[in-house]
Image (cartoon, grey):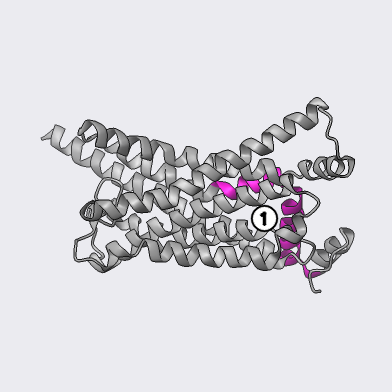
């Protein structure tokens, strides 16, 4: 009896701990990404094109924090999904769609940084605000359409009572699932590897003093490579893949070996470490982007005191009311 009582208490404590952790994560994701969006929306000074891609990432993560993560809190307490199959399909669809949007957006960020280094003299004419917005609209629409077949099918969604999430059943459309994985991961991974390899090679050449024949190009390149957005964007991409690699490796291991890992802590951890990626952006951006720190400070001062906010904006040559 004592052993049974101990197991019950331990199970309740584990469930409560999971629910609290998921709740904290949901709040952190929502607040951090709302702060990023509000900061850029409030900032009226000159902005880089990459900021629109960062806004796209923040919107995707904000939707995840609002419409996906909170639905896992109560199931973590009870151990069962109680919202019904419709909500289960919806959250499962959002999970894969928002993940695809993030992967595609990282691809466009790498392309943007590549063009900034490859064509520093023509970058502003090649990468315009309108073109960037069109790519983002295309990304959201294509991701939403590519991920919709399972939600339109007749198969039941899969309820993970260990990680407390719902997933669409991609197993019944294996050919389409493989095609989708290739369409999402293929161009993205290839672009990211190629583009950042080129950027780091050019950084090494510039630091080593290797001669560049065109002096105007060399000057523009040196000025461009001093932009912290290059390294910041790489750290964002790296953090994203490092967050999701444990889950990817676990799924690959189970697929290849046919052995299902029964450890509940591992299965819970790999999922939510991946979701935790939605929170890291504000830390990385605040640490590595001086312009974002200024914009964030202006926003905070403007919220706290309108006069101080305007004074701070004037000190950096901006006016938030323009």
Outermost residue to the left: 1
Residue 34 image offset from top left, x and y in percent: 58, 62
Quarter assignment of residue 56: bottom right
Residue 263 in view of the camera? no
Residue hosting label 1: 50
Rendered residue at 71%/67% (across/down) = 42
Quarter assignment of residue 137: bottom right
Above/below status of 127 relative to 22? below
Q: In the depicted view, which residue is nearer to us: 161 or 11? A: 161
Residue 173 image offset from top left, x and y in percent: 24, 55
Q: In the depicted view, which residue is nearer to us: 215 or 181? A: 215
Residue 150 image offset from top left, x and y in percent: 28, 62
Above/below status of 20 relative to 202? below
Quadrant assignment for the C terminus: bottom right
Q: In the depicted view, which residue is nearer to us: 300 or 4? A: 300
For the stretch drawn in magenta, the main secondary structure is: helix
Rendered residue at 32%/47% (across/down) = 16
Tell whether position 271 is magenta. Answer: no
Rendered residue at 48%/57% (across/down) = 101
Region of the chain picked out in magenta, as a range: 280-306
Rendered residue at 62%/50% (across/down) = 111
- Is label 1 in a helix, a strand or a loop? helix
- Left or right side of 74 for 245: right
């Amino acid at each position: 009896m004592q052993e049974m009582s101990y197991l019950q208490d331990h199970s309740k404590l584990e469930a409560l701990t999971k629910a609290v952790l998921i709740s904290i994560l949901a709040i952190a994701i929502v607040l951090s990404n709302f702060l990023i969006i509000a900061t850029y929306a409030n900032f009226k000074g000159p902005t880089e094109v990459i900021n629109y891609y960062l806004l796209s990432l923040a919107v995707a993560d904000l939707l995840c924090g609002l419409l996906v993560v909170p639905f896992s809190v109560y199931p973590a307490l009870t151990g069962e999904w109680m919202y019904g199959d419709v909500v289960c399909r919806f959250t499962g669809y959002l999970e894969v769609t928002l993940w695809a949007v993030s992967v595609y957006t990282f691809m466009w960020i790498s392309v943007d940084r590549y063009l900034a280094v490859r064509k520093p003299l023509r970058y502003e004419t090649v990468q315009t605000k309108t073109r960037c917005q069109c790519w983002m609209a295309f990304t959201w629409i294509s991701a939403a359409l590519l991920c919709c077949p399972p939600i339109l099918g007749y198969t039941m969604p899969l309820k993970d009572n260990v990680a407390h999430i719902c997933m669409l059943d991609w197993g019944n459309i294996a050919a389409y699932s493989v095609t989708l994985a290739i369409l999402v991961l293929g161009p993205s991974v290839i672009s990211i590897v190629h583009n950042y390899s080129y950027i780091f090679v050019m950084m090494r050449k510039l630091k080593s003093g290797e001669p560049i024949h065109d002096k105007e190009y060399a000057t523009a390149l040196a000025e461009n490579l001093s932009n912290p957005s290059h390294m910041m964007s790489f750290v964002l991409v790296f953090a994203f893949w490092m967050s999701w690699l444990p889950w990817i490796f676990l799924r690959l291991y189970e697929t290849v070996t046919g052995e299902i890992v029964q450890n509940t802590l591992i299965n819970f951890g790999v999922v939510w470490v991946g979701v935790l990626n939605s929170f890291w952006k504000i830390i990385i951006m605040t640490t590595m982007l001086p312009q974002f720190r200024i914009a964030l400070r202006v926003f905070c001062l403007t919220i706290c005191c309108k006069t101080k906010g305007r004074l701070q904006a004037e000190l950096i040559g901006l006016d938030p009311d323009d």
